[in-house]
Image: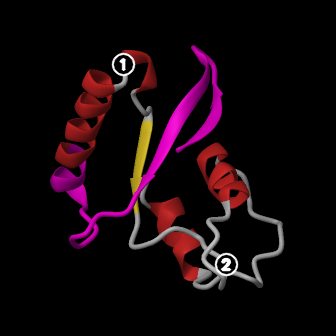
Amino acid sequence: MVGRPDETTGEAICAFVVLKQARPSGDEAHAIAGTLRDWVGTEIGPIAKPRDIRFGDNLPKTRSGKIMRRLLRAIAKGEEITQDVSTLENPAILEQLKQSS
């Protein structure tokens, strides 16, 4: 989960989700996203519900396994990624996460 600017609330939560099953799309993705939002609202509180939920096969990680949160923040904000991505384990995951909005 990362924050992104929001006109209404100041900052909105964007969740990047990796499921144990195949990455959902279409109606299945909307149904799972709704279930996740409801769960967060019940367990943590309504203020913590993610505005955006993006599904991917994996997260952008370095070869040593560290999640690159700065890249997740850039994707959530809709910014072009200009930072160095040469240390990523799988650079193609960035395009997948951009498209799954």
Name the image quarter holding residue 43: top left
Query: Residue visible at 62% across and 56% down?
Result: 72
Say if the magenta span includes residue 22: yes
What percent of the width, then of the height, locates residue 84?
A: 83, 74
Looking at the rendered structure, the secondary structure element under dot 1 is loop
Residue topped by disc 1: 45
Q: Residues within 10 Å of mark 1 (few under 14, many from 20)?
A: few
Residue 86 position, x and y percent, is 77, 84
Residue to which mark 2 is pinned: 62
Where is residue 67 shown, x and y percent of the image?
62, 65
> Going by the picture, which residue comes out furthest to the top?
8
Whether residue 3 sits left or right of residue 49 in the image: it is right
Amino acid type assigned to the residue bearing label 2 in the image: Thr
25 and 35: which one is in front?
Answer: 35
Indicate the amino acid at tag 1.
Gly
- Residue 70: percent from left, percent from top: 73, 56
> Hey, which quadrant is residue 44 in on the image?
top left
What residue range appears in magenta? 1-30
Question: Considering only order in the chain, which callout, 1 or 2, is on the residue closer to the N terminus?
Answer: 1
88 in the magenta segment: no
Callout 2: 10 Å neighbours few (<14), some, many (20+)? some
